[in-house]
Amino acid sequence: MKFSSLFVVLLSVTCMMVACSKKSDDVAAAAGSTYSAEKPSAIMTGISNAIVATGTGLTTASTAGVQHQELKPMLVASACDSNGEPNSPLNYGSSAYPGTLTYCKMVINSQSPDTVQGGFALVKNISCALEKAGLVFDGQAHSTSITIDSTCFSAKQISEMGGTMTISVTASKPAAFNTYFDAGVVLDVTGQNMIFKIATKVSGTKVEFATMEDQGTNKKGLSYGSLDTADGSLRYETRMERIDCTESGSCGWNRHIKLFADLTMNGNTPGDVESVSFGYSNIQSTPGQSGLGGLLVTASGNLTTGIKARLWQASNGTVNQLPAATSDYNTPGNWKEVSNTSCYTKSSDSAGTCGSGAAGFTSNVNFLLFGPSYTAVSTWFTNFAGATWNAVDVSAD
């Protein structure tokens, strides 16, 4: 069962960007450089690099030569498809599936919210172009022309889009929509029922960004990331609410990804993974999608005492029976675990030291961003005042 998606686009012409291949070096922030809240693309790139290092560290580490046995013979291209899903012959019943999915979601940039990097890939490129055009942080709306060139876009994007595009941009310090952030940018696409917000914060060695898309009722999403270059703590979250909109392809699904990782650091450059905590949920519904289905994956631990990855599937209350209605998602007991014994350490995929790993749903299913009591995207974004989680708890949203 695959879940399709289409990331929000800023203008009709930019929809081609979603399908474009990953850039090899997106406006990279050099090691040891100083981040600025007025340069969101560098902050996003630094956090993106840390996400890649986390995923890569699950299979190889520069100091320990870590290689999970189930991934050892695989290259990224053969282990993962372009949407960050494990390739065939792996399926939900395979013991390797949840660990491989965790890896794929971090190392693949799908250019859409299928993956961790993809949740903010488009806005990172747009931010780069806006910075080149010149952001004025005066709280006033400016009509800004963006040039599609090699500074911020790939050769394919230049070939398909070319030229320039013009949007209304309002930049403020602090962010007018949430003063927790040092700087904020609002992109208002006139006549397209589309608003995009970008926020950044730099506090000593810690950098943060948040982005929000708003395409009207039932079609909202956000991404958040932070990295402390002093202690290597990485936090990331994507929240997409689209299950109640009906447009085929881009609607009919909710997706939530949350990540905490401890990394070694060399200046701004991330190194090896010391520990990881990961949660991923994906639910879908008609008419935006072809049917009902849901998936929950968690992974937690470290490569010394073991990382345990687990998987649950949505059901109607009976194992191997798909949900009969979206209301079936609301009952924690309807999520049935596909058991596996894999435990990943530096030398083994079946170590016996990592225990049970992170639990699935217990008291509620708010992590699905579904039902009566979760925090809506717009509320989360407006009220956000810093992230402090050191582990992912899927019984909270």
Image (spheres, grey):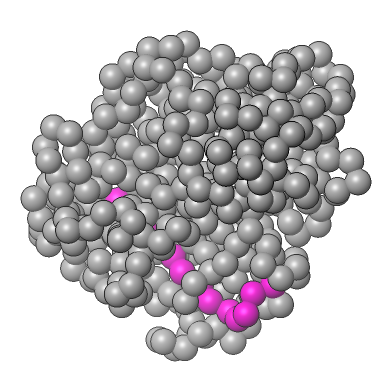
289 is within the stretch colored magenta: yes
Question: For residue 41, which quarter of the picture?
Answer: top right
Residue 187 in sight from this viewpoint: no
Going 12% across and 40% down the picture, which residue do you hit?
65
Residue shown at 38% from the left, 12% from the top: 32
**Percent position (x, y) of residue 66?**
14, 44
Residue 372 image-quadrant placement: bottom right
Q: Position of residue 311 (x, y in %)?
A: 36, 68
Tell me: residue 242, above or below residue 327: above
Residue at the outermost right position: 191
Residue 363: where, in percent of width, then height?
49, 64
Left or right, 303 with respect to 270, comes to left
In this view, the residue in front, 12 or 183, is: 12
Residue 94 percent coordinates (x, y): 27, 74
Query: Is residue 253 found left or right of 382 in the rendered image?
Result: left
Asked if 221 appears above or below 137 in the picture, the reply is below
- Residue extent of the magenta highlight: 288-300
| 261 sits to left or right of 46 | left
